[in-house]
Amino acid sequence: MTSTDPVVRTIIEANLYMVLATADEGGRPWASPVYYAHADFREFFWVSSPTSTHSRNLAVRPELGIVIFDSQVPISTGQGVYMTAVGEQVKDTELERGMDVFSRRSLLHGGVAWTPRDVQGEPAIRLYRATVEEHSILAKDGQPDHRVPAHLGS
């Protein structure tokens, strides 16, 4: 693991919401904050309506960007985790594991327990997953705003 690991891990663990950046078929961008849970900092789960803009976008264009950051820090001191990922609605055969990950974090933050039944049938809310391809953070090297890869190791 590299020295960036603690930064990435701390930011992801300390925050409740991530911003999804999706695009529709024509490339029109859309950003949405969602509550998330993660598995090993590489899989991120959230629940949404399949009719929401970001869900419809993922159905036609699964590539997405994600950012997690603390918006309460003083100006010029912020740090964020930027991720490229592929998103999808979680298949029924994988719901048990995904809902377990999501439910454990929900309970940790004062939310409710979730089960696969909560994302099947009506009301129409579904579990989604982003599988991260790359993590990066802002370089803190005195140069203008740019990102550097963050390697989490195996």
Image (cartoon, grey):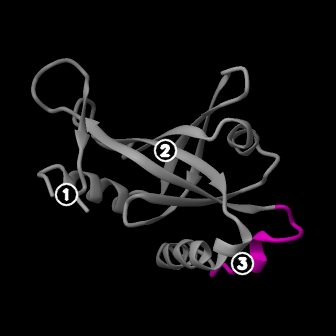
Q: Which region of the structure is painted magenta?
A: 113-124
Q: Earlier in the sequence, mark 2 or mark 3?
A: 2
Task: Tell me the amino acid under the disc marked 2.
Answer: Ala
- Report crowding for label 2: few under 14, some 14 to 19, many 20 or more residues within 10 A (C-alpha): many
What amino acid is labelled 1 in the image?
A: Pro
Which residue: 25% across, 24% down? 146
Q: Earlier in the sequence, mark 1 or mark 3?
A: 1
Is residue 78 shown to the viewer in this render? no
Q: Position of residue 106 (x, y in %)?
A: 54, 73
Choose top left, top right, bottom left or bottom right for residue 123.
bottom right
Give the residue drawn at x 69%, y 74%: 93
Q: Secondary structure at mark 2?
A: strand
Q: Earlier in the sequence, mark 1 or mark 2?
A: 1
Q: Is residue 109 left or right of residue 80?
A: right
Residue 129 falls left or right of residue 60:
left
Q: Disc 3 marks which amino acid?
A: Pro
How far apart, in angstroms, are the residues tagged by discs 2 and 3?
Answer: 24 Å
From the image, state whether disc 1 or disc 3 is nearer to you.
Answer: 3
Residue 116 marker: 3
- Label 1 crowding class (10 Å Cα cut-off): few <14, some 14-19, many 20+? few
Would you name the residue on which mark 1 appears? 6
The mark closer to the camera, 2 or 3, is: 2
Q: Secondary structure at mark 3?
A: helix
Which quadrant is home to the N terminus? bottom left
Residue in the foreground of this view, choosing between 110 and 37: 37
